[in-house]
Amino acid sequence: MGDDGRMHAMEDDESATADQIRAIDIYPLSNYYFGSKEPLVFKDKTLADRVIRMKSNYAAYGLRTSVEAVLLVELFKHPHVLLLQIRNSIFNLPGGRLRPNESDIDGLKRKLSRKLSANGAPDASDWEVGDCLGTWWRPDFETLLYPHLSNNVKGAKECTKLFLVKLPESRKFIVPKNLKLIAVPLCQLHENHKMYGPVISGIPQLLSKFSFNIIET
């Protein structure tokens, strides 16, 4: 192949790569309204309580499946992820455990409405759930989540799926009084396992296949 042929091939490869990168529209944080509602009742006071409850649920229903949302906004010209902060030290993505026989999409919409909408607001259909960004596994009740299962693990105890949820241009977030909804820069999450844990700190890598289209309003 001559120089011209190689050059055309390189241009075609670059064009194909560019076509594969999908853009995500994100809107300024100032477009959104934040209010509060009655506190959320936590089922577990300690880690030991959570382990006991997980074992009980596993005995009754088998594998626990959770779904969580990656919500993006713009602040200072950079993409930020919305996280729920508990007691100033614990950070979670909005979401939660599925009910038996509930689909991933329906369960995530229900959880988002419960935690981020006004009480009784019938807006579950308003959440635009997109790509599944990744799946994480807990091999036993007391370990961290991992993005893969080892061959020697007979059966995982928990599966957590992350979904990209596209926000509209504006929205009301009504958050329980004992939670804070905060915007954290994507760059601050990167490999920050100590602060955010392995799942949240891995979000920047999961989003690397997208570009961000910041829409100023």
Image (cartoon, helix red, strand yellow):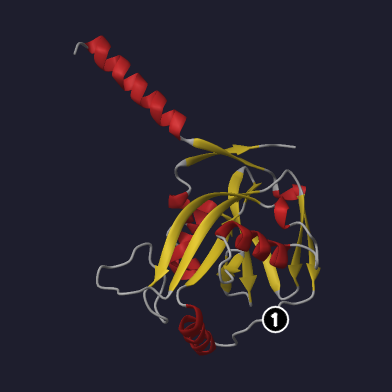
Q: Amino acid at mark 1?
A: Val
* Residue at left offset 53%, top offset 52%: 186
Residue lying farthest to the front in this orientation: 101
* Residue at left offset 50%, top offset 83%: 60
Q: Quadrant of residue 91?
A: bottom right
Q: Quadrant of residue 173?
A: bottom right
Q: Is residue 194 visible?
A: yes
Disc 1 is placed on an element classified as loop
Question: If the image is split into quadrants, where does the N terminus sit?
Answer: top left
Q: Quadrant of residue 43?
A: bottom right
Whole-percent x, y for residue 14 in the image: 37, 26
Question: If the image is split into quadrants, where does the C terminus sit?
Answer: top right
Please name whichever residue, 49 or 74, is drawn nearer the observer in this view of the structure: 49
- Residue identified by numbered label 1: 41
**Quick check: 28 left or right of 155?**
right
Please name whichever residue, 210 or 193, is drawn nearer the observer in this view of the structure: 210
**Quick check: 186 left or right of 173?**
left
* Residue at left offset 57%, top offset 69%: 98
